[in-house]
Image (cartoon, helix red, strand yellow):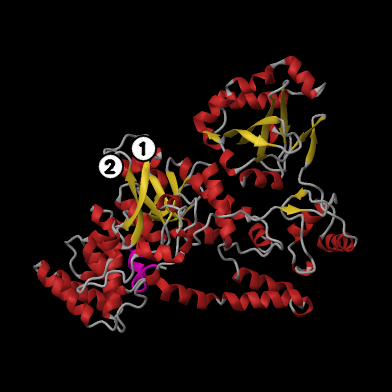
Amino acid sequence: MGIKKGRELFSQNSTVDTTLSRLREVIIKEKVQVNDYRPIVAVDTSVWYRQSLANPRDDSKVSAQYHSEPRVPVAAVSSSIAKKASILRQHRFEVILVFDGAYHPLKDEEHSARENQLSREQNLAKLADAYSNPDNYSVEDVNKIKKALLYPRNDITHDIVQVAKQNKFMVAGAPFETDFQIAALHNQGIIDVAWSVDTDMLGLGVQYVIKSMTQQGKIKLMDYNKLVTRTLPKEFGHPNIRIRQADLNLYCCMLGNDILRNGKPGEGRVRCGKKMNEYLAMASDEAKRRFIEDYRNAHDNPRRFSMALFAWEHSPAYLIVPDDPEVSAKDALILGEYNVELGSMAALPIEHRREDFFLPTDDCPKLGYIPHLQLRSKHEYMDGSTHPTHRNFFRMEVYARTGRPLEAVPKQYNNNDQEVAYGAIINFDNYPMKFVPTRQIEFWLSCRGVCTNELNRDQMMRMAEKLWHNKVDALPKFVLRGGGAYVAVCILEFESEATVDWKTRDEALVEIRGEKCACIDDADFIKDVFSNAHNAKRLRCLKHLKGGSFDISDVKVSSNLKSKLLPNVNFFVIDFSCAPSQKGLGSEGKRRIMILTVNTLTSMRMRTTLTTTMTTAMLVNK
């Protein structure tokens, strides 16, 4: 939420319109870096998360997937986040997705206010009543309730983390709030830019904060330098000075923030500006210290004000500690040669990482709690011999909000105990068909072998009712597609998270130009695999890949994908975008998967499959 009063000073008056390319040039110049330097953007993932959930259409993929019964992966969210991160990468930025951890104890009032405003329990009760009494509610009524219930879920967070790792985007978990973790990464010199819509990112001292971006790379940027050299000096009546970070900390607490929700009662932006004018006119640091003390004592809640001011500088965050003291925190993070400690986001002396740094004193209550003890109390099992480390939490191997590893949605099975595609199972007794989105009914029917190309919604509902009444079961989780006089299995998956391995960019090109694809030029191989079918299209597409005709940032390959139907076969998969003419589909989209099947016992075989929505999602989410 950010600053409470005077938000426009941060979000509007200190915002500039620019592009990612220009921002990168400015950063390279400021940091005296070489031209191929790739700045790092730390993304407050909750922003992209909620933007993806806030899809306005009632029959959107997000809404259909989110409200499925039983649950299915909400692949539309992780795909949307990966797409935004890819735009940054295309403009030569690297990305760290930063995730919230446990609730910050000093923000209990803020969290309570948000929960009361959203009335989650009330909406859940309404939805349950609608499903129990469908005749009493219209589809429009239920869609409105569904929109109000689009909250982050742990299984969606799991999928976002997995997609990020597959695409080699970095992830970082915060012990508490994302804002403070991003500030710590900035203070350690690890990141160059933040992405957030919260105004407090500028207040915490982050140099550049992106708050929106187009696909073409145009951005709205909150600029810290503009805030402290132009916007606030003008606001305070001291146009020729630069506002120090310590002064900005005080002002942010005067205005009110997520820790001190309303600031000082009766003081708005104008009065706070006059107070800052008086404060900045003081000649000595001692006079300023007495001003802060008098302001605190006159506050309705002096203790809370003291804690907010301390938190604005020293809120807890994870800090990167390089294994080699001669290596920077940024290089250590990239190399993976580091440990993680919990300490002040200011990231200054090592003493600020000790528990006793946060101990209250007679002069200052500090945070009013010890962060290390707070995490232990939230995750009591951490007292055992195998408790997770701060590094586990930071790397999102364990989720700091729950103290447990994130888990995916359970797989779905038909009555024959065969795994089926997500969405193939719907309990229409608990989820009345009246309220099920059209795309879900269509997919449910297709998983039972029903072609829906010529059917409207009413016809699909009548067909689904008959199949449900007759207990027609879903087909097993594999899809066959014909093409070019051959048949190929479309769905592949990684055996486990540990085997997920996508090669990208130059590494992908090396793999494609290597021996694994050599057989495609062999006449005997082509005859053996494709019989008399024409192979020119596949051959031409592969030659384009080898020759570098495609955007290398869009190409990825893997040798680790498996098929349960062919357990003794290794697959070499090439995933990339191509023109419709190169796959002969026209209107079915622009993705294709080229699979080189490598049978380690006998020969090598080449397959080409045409992806559908389901197969693409399955590959992306493994």
Q: Residue 482 placed where, x, y %?
A: 81, 35
List the residue tagged with mark 1: 37
Residue at 85% across, 60% down: 464
Residue at 18% across, 76% down: 293
Locate the C terminus and report the quarter of the image it occupies.
top right
Locate the N terminus and report the quarter of the image it occupies.
bottom left
**Answer yes or no: do the residues labelled 2 and 1 have beta carbons within 8 Å?**
yes
Magenta run includes residue 28: no
- The magenta segment is 2-14
Q: Amino acid at mark 2?
A: Lys
Q: Earlier in the sequence, mark 2 or mark 1?
A: 2
Residue at 30% across, 65% down: 312
**Overall secondary structure of the magenta section:** loop
Q: Residue 325 placed where, x, y %?
A: 27, 40
Q: Amino acid at mark 1?
A: Tyr
For this view, does 434 lie left or right of residue 240?
Answer: right
- Secondary structure under tag 1 reads loop
Q: Image quarter for residue 26? A: top left
Residue at 32% across, 46% down: 321
List the residue tagged with mark 2: 31
Neighbour tally class for label 1: few under 14, some 14-19, many 20 plus, Cα within 10 Å? some
Query: Is residue 12 shown to the viewer in this render?
Result: no
Q: Residue 421 placed where, x, y %?
A: 74, 50
Query: Is residue 152 shown to the viewer in this render?
Result: yes
- Secondary structure under tag 2 reads loop
Where 460 sits versus 279, above or below? above
